[in-house]
Image (cartoon, rainbow, N blue to C red):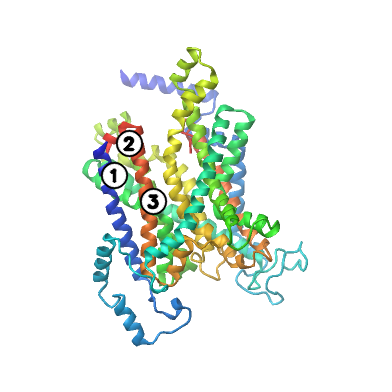
Amino acid sequence: MFQYIIRRVLWTIPVLWLVATVTFFLMHAAPGSPWDAKSTGGRQLDPALEASFNRKYGLDEPLLVQYTTYLKNAVLLDFGESYTKRGQTVAEIIGQGFPYSARIGVLALMLALAIGVPVGIYAALRHNTIGDYLSLFATTISYTLPDFVLAIFLLVVFAVKLGWFPILFSDWRSYILPAVALGTGSAAYIARLTRASMLEALRADYVTTARAKGLRYRAVVVRHVLRNSLIPVLTVIGPAFAALITGTIIIERVFGVPGMGRLFIDSITTRDYPVIMGVTLFYAFIIVLSNLAVDIAYGFVDPRIRSSQ
Amino acid sequence: MSQAIVQAGDTGSVGVAATRRARGLWSDAWRRLRRNRAAVIGLAYIALMLVVAIFAPWLAPYDPNDIPPTAFANTPPVWQDGGTWDYPLGTDSLARDELSRLIYGARISMVVGIVPTMIVVVIGVTYGLVSGWLGGWWDNVLMRLVDVVYAFPSLLLFIIFQAALRDSWLGRSLGGLTLLFVAFAITGWNGMARLIRGETLRLRQQEFVIAARAMGNPPHRIIFRHILPNALTPIIVAVSFTIPGYILAEASLSFLGIGIRPPTASWGSMVFLSFPIVTYLPVFVILPSALIALIMIAFAFVGDGLRDALDPQADRSR
């Protein structure tokens, strides 16, 4: 098991390196520079000033030198300073934006679990009844409905028409609609997963045995079925969280949240190279980490996976 | 001896066929699909959207990118105050006819769903077949590459890709469609490759493939005659989920303002354009959003239906 974990952890290094490399060269392959009139909002920089900026940030050096310098610094967790927000390091900027995204992501995940698991359990226990079919239909629709479309519907109905929530991002109420928009799809997914694994567990031999020895149905469900069927649900929490965190890019745009998503889009339009790299690597790190958590969780749950890779 | 048995069996099956119509995998699946009401509705809706996409120039009352001579910007739809039957769904903030743009938007959604999926199927199936067939060291190397691409967050890559190359010649061609195709193909082939590689590994060990090899068939014939046809059902199911994925990806990127280039009309870019006036005329945001949602739901119904029809024993957990 220990060896398996080490192997999975080491595997994240080439992945992060690849993400850094692809992003770095794609970013620099784009026509234009951070000092363009287009990037700075119409101000055309004096060529001498531009040259001094380039020197300051090392942009006058050959691309490969810049690349190796970046990697060297990144390994030491130094991700540089922003070009547009002078004097702020990338780490500080992410530190300002991430809490908003994280709050929405965590809230959405809690919502997804709080709704998804009970709905799944209900549907499985009422297998092939009208309740089961209705919840299946509801989960299909909510799983399919794109989160940004749902976000727009929620915004129009609850903020614009009914006025229950602020349209512009302001206080704690501003977190609710984004979290609902983001969490609905995951709730549907979790509900379906719970239902499927419950149904499987209900048919298992140990359930028959437990029933045969005279245990009441309720006790069997709580003690045997639930415990076994919630394992797959636990393992999707990692990737679900990663999906929610990256999913906020679009949701944040709808609700005007000053989080990571806005940071990312802004940094791309202004060619803020260090911020683009930093945010991309940060996202990739979250995703890789959550995949890693799942792999390790599966390794614990299912010994076959440990030995096969 | 064995010859005689086969012949006897043949005449037997002919006798059955005379009394009952032959039923193959495909006709069985089609029958099951037709019985699934949601799938039929979804299929009908997709067919309708295809018709709209193909006949857009005849259906649309105006040129989607042109400003009609009598049009004003932000004319509300006919059922609201100030609306006119000249522009039943109103005009957008650049005074272009909303209905015509929605009709042309169906084109972008259909093309952006279908073309990259075809590319992904060709690349992924080839890759998966090669990896699964060769096995061993090659399989290991090829699958590690798949793992790496898999780990790359695709939405991030789309965004960076679009931002970096939007203003290059690639990003300008076909109103930004070409770049979307490339971005989707680069990130999408690996899922298909993984699926087909698994199928190939499974099928390679089945008796009929071993028998075909023992009879001295060359690898290409075994792959195309025996393995690929048997891997067709998972490919079809995967395709039915890949197409809506790309439709949504285009809509999302266009909504962020980095997908389809103006003036080309796409549902996502229409949401993007009208979003600043969402408090004033929400209908211009709602209409394209609703069309995006409907096509996604239609594909989901068809996808679920196809999976149930083609593989009744399939795991229904997802």
**Residue linked to disc 1:** A8
Q: From the viewer's perspective, is residue B67 above or below residue A17? A: below
Circle 3 packing at 10 Å, graded few (<14), some (14-19), many (20+), is many
Q: From the viewer's perspective, is residue A124 above or below residue A112? A: above
**For this rendering, which residue is in front, A41 or B149?**
A41
Provide the secondary structure element on which disc 1 rests.
Answer: helix
Q: From the viewer's perspective, is residue B298 above or below residue B5? A: below
**For this rendering, which residue is in front, B170 or A80?**
A80
**Residue linked to disc 2:** A299
Provide the secondary structure element on which disc 2 rests.
Answer: helix
Same-subunit check for callouts 1 and 3: yes
**For this rendering, which residue is in front, B107 or B261?**
B261
Q: Mark 2 belongs to which amino acid?
A: Gly
Labels 2 and 3: the sequence-earlier one: 3
Residue B225 seen by the camera:
no
Same-subunit check for callouts 2 and 3: yes
Q: Mark 3 belongs to which amino acid?
A: Ile
Q: Where's residue A133, x and y in %?
A: 61, 33
Residue at position x 47%, y 27% in the image:
A200
Residue at position x 38%, y 76% in the image:
A33
State how far apart marks 1 and 3 are (Cα): 14 Å
Q: Mark 1 belongs to which amino acid?
A: Arg
State how far apart marks 2 and 1 are (Cα): 10 Å
State how far apart marks 2 and 3 are (Cα): 18 Å
Residue A213 seen by the camera:
yes
Q: Residue furthest left?
A: B137
Query: Which numbered disc covers residue A287?
Result: 3
Q: Where's residue B12, x and y in %?
A: 45, 20
Q: Where's residue B310, x and y in %?
A: 48, 35
**Left of B302 or right of it: where is B62?**
right
